[in-house]
Amino acid sequence: MRTILGLDTGGTFTDAAIINAEDSSVIRTSKSLTTRQDLSIGVGNAMRLALGIEAPSDMLNYISENYISGTHQKLTIEDIELVCLSTTLATNSIVENAGSHVALVLIGFAKDVLELGKLGKAIGQNPVIFIDGGHKSDGTVRSPLDTKSLLQAIKSTAPQVSAFAVASYFATRNPEHEIIARDYIRGHTQMPVSCSHELSASLGGPKRALTAFFNAKLISLLEKLINATQQQMHHIGLNCKLMVVKGDGSLVSADFARERPVETILSGPAASVTGAALLANQRT
């Protein structure tokens, strides 16, 4: 029997469901407390409960409920051909203004850009670095990139943050300065960097900057969740592929989600709508 193991990690509970890939029926479901201090505990409990595998004694305190639906079909690890992960952690992080401390590098923008689209309000107390540079609407250089100031700012800001976001003026027409800044940051800090041109094709600088900023804030969170899930898959013996649900309900690889965690915002609600449509025999 071909089956899919679905996981959803929320702020309170982590749910698991095993689906028959051939007729879309729900075979078994489970629920465990989400363990913020170590996401692998809650994820591992939910997976083991759904699969009928006994949890280690140190995990038992976190088990909340176990629901069995459908027939009591005997399942084996080999029956699971895919693990799909959705989460509301990214959505919660944005709403709660949580997540990692991030530095936003703005290249070629005037300081009043922070007043546009409430960019400054969203960034809050996170550091913002203004650097000369950027391009014109035709992709030609508007002003040379001030690499000296960039390097100084990177070195002084790095101890305060866990990631950087970079947005350059008209980077969607020419991303050269964002790429140079990204390489400088990675070369001198080894920290994650989110570039606006990689995440959005929009010409609107403030919106691109905000997208890059949120992406950088979520990198650490999604990295922990994906690593926790893969760790538990390994312990259980699941050798299948792990996919992550995007905010539009489609699936992407775990590696893609690590690089672009901002696309998992509304992942949990999207998975819920897709599941409800499936159970109601309706197309999404």
Image: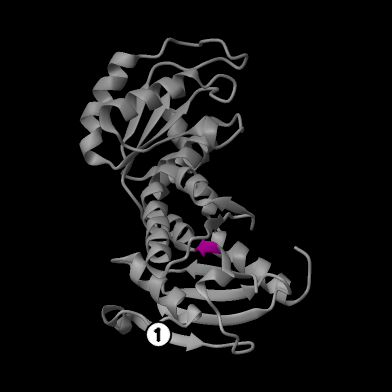
Query: Nearest the camera: 64 or 163?
Result: 64
Where residue 189 sits: x, y (%)?
Answer: 27, 31
Dominant secondary-structure state across the stretch colored magenta: strand
Residue 158 is left or right of residue 44, and the answer is left
Q: Residue 64: x, y in percent? A: 40, 85
* Residue 108 showing in the rendered view: no
Up-down relation of residue 120 to residue 63 (above or below): above
Range of the magenta residues? 83-87
Q: Nearer the viewer, residue 13 or 6?
A: 6
At 29% from the left and 34% from the top, the residue drawn is: 190
Q: Mark 1 — residue?
A: 64
In the rendered structure, does residue 86 fall within the stretch colored magenta?
yes
Q: Is residue 16 left or right of residue 132?
A: right
How far from the left and from the top, in percent, is residue 157? 24, 33
Frontmost residue, 47 versus 220: 47
Residue 275: horizontal and vertical position, in percent?
66, 71
Seen in the picture, residue 182 relative to 174 is either above or below; the reply is: below
Residue 227 in view: yes
